Image: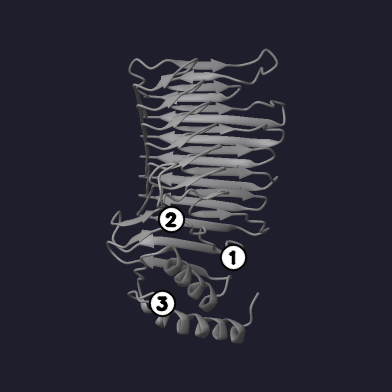
């Protein structure tokens, strides 16, 4: 942890750099910031992290109608996530746009990031809780050569991801997670809360057109509410999103309420979503709660237009599947698995 003197000196140096950038306010201690480029946004992030110790919550507020555009050879952004909490928010909900600069895979001047997470990649290793909170921002036109078009997370620590009133549109990953890729590999708890968000027209060339959640030993808890998945596509499984990975220990829980999954498409299974508890044992529990969700015109080339479920305990309450099919498989060895329709 940097000393107070060290942070002050670093903050002073960053302010000197910021003053020479031809932009609006980039100093987060003076109020909301209005960067226009990836470099300016990173300058504001660095200034905030230099001024505020990691033991405190760091809040970076983008001014109303801020529009940030990435250029062809831009790196992704970097955040010190091994602190208590980092909040990235828009001062006026849903008026801030971060454009990844991708205009097509082979278009001249188009940006495709060679790596994971076109906007942000996180590798939290903390033993105490660490949280990334993003609120009221639209992410569009991000493309990556690997996982997580916009955000990629590989966690071995106690990590929480909170998204509120965000939009992820027209992003892609050449592997998994057209907008978000989340890999949990720890025996401690990870939690994802997504509320009032939209995932639209995102593409993954493997799994999870909108989001790919993958866990091995993770105690993974995912809650989505009032969140919509429209027109997302995955070449393999999980058109809207996928919750997968070998669950060798602990549990995975998906709680989904009042969400809409419409017009998503998949090359194999689970047009709306795909969920698997593939390595079942009596020490694991994979549970899906669904209430008040609507599925319509999702497409799966093989099984499960609405969803594909493998070895999960499912509780369903007042969901509308219209004419979308569902697919549920419970192996003979999985005697605890059940499906309940209220």
Q: Residue at x 61, y 20 (%)?
A: 337
Residue 339: horizontal and vertical position, in percent?
52, 19
Residue hosting label 2: 134
Q: Within 10 angstroms of label 1, few (less than 14), some, or many (20 or more) residues?
A: many
Q: Are marks 2 and 1 in contact (CB under 8 Å)?
A: no
* Secondary structure state at the residue bearing disc 3: loop
Q: Give the SS element for disc 2.
A: strand
Number of numbered markers: 3
The tag on residue 263 is none
- Name the spot of residue 309 as percent of width and height, x first: 54, 22
* Residue 330: image location, x then y, percent: 61, 16
- Label 2, label 1: how many angstroms apart (C-alpha)? 16 Å
* Label whose residue precedes the other's in the sequence (3 or 1): 3
Rendered position, 313 above or below 195: above
Callouts 2 and 3 close, C-beta under 8 Å: no
Give the residue drawn at x 37%, y 49%.
166
Q: Which mark is residue 27?
A: 3
C-alpha gap between disc 3 and disc 1: 20 Å
Q: Which residue is mark 1?
A: 83
Q: Earlier in the sequence, mark 2 or mark 3?
A: 3
Q: Answer left or right for 97 relative to 175.
A: left
**Rendered position, 211 above or below 142:** above
Instruction: Identify the residue at horizontal 38%, vertical 23% (top origin).
Output: 298
Please tell me in which quadrant of the rendered image residue 30 appears. bottom left
Q: Is residue 217 left or right of residue 322?
A: right
Q: In what element is the residue under mark 1?
A: loop
Q: Quadrant of residue 137?
A: bottom left
Dot 2 or dot 1: first in sequence order is 1
What residue is shown at x 42% (from left), y 69% (from top)? Answer: 40
In the picture, which quadrant includes the C terminus?
A: top left
Residue 175 or residue 245, whichever sits in front: 175
């Amino acid at each position: 942890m940097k000393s107070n003197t060290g942070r002050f000196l670093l903050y002073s140096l960053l302010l000197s750099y910021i003053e020479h950038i031809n932009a609006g306010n980039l100093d987060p201690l003076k109020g909301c910031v209005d960067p226009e480029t990836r470099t300016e946004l990173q300058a504001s992030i660095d200034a905030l992290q230099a001024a505020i110790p990691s033991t405190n919550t760091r809040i970076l507020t983008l001014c109303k109608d801020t529009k940030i555009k990435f250029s062809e050879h831009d790196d992704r952004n970097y955040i010190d996530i091994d602190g208590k909490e980092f909040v990235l928010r828009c001062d006026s909900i849903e008026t801030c746009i971060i454009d990844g600069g991708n205009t097509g895979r082979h278009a001249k001047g188009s940006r495709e990031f060679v790596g994971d997470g076109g906007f942000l990649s996180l590798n939290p290793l903390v033993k105490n809780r660490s949280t990334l909170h993003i609120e009221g921002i639209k992410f569009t036109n991000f493309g990556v050569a690997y996982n997580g078009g916009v955000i990629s997370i590989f966690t071995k620590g106690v990590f929480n991801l909170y998204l509120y009133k965000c939009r992820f549109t027209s992003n892609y990953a050449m592997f998994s997670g057209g907008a978000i890729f989340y890999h949990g590999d720890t025996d401690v708890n990870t939690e994802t809360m997504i509320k009032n968000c939209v995932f639209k027209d995102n593409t993954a060339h493997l799994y999870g057109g909108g989001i790919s959640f993958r866990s091995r030993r993770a105690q993974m808890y995912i809650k989505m509410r009032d969140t919509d998945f429209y027109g997302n596509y995955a070449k393999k499984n999980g058109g809207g999103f996928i919750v997968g990975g070998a669950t060798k220990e602990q549990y995975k829980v998906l709680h989904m309420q009042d969400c809409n999954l419409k017009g998503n498409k998949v090359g194999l299974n689970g047009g709306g979503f795909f969920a698997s508890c593939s390595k079942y044992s009596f020490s694991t529990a994979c549970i899906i709660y669904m209430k008040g969700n609507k599925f319509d015109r999702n497409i799966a080339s093989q099984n499960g237009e609405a969803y594909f479920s493998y070895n999960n305990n499912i509780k369903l309450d007042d969901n509308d599947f219209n004419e979308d099919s569902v697919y549920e498989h419970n192996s003979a060895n999985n005697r605890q698995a059940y499906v309940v329709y209220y």
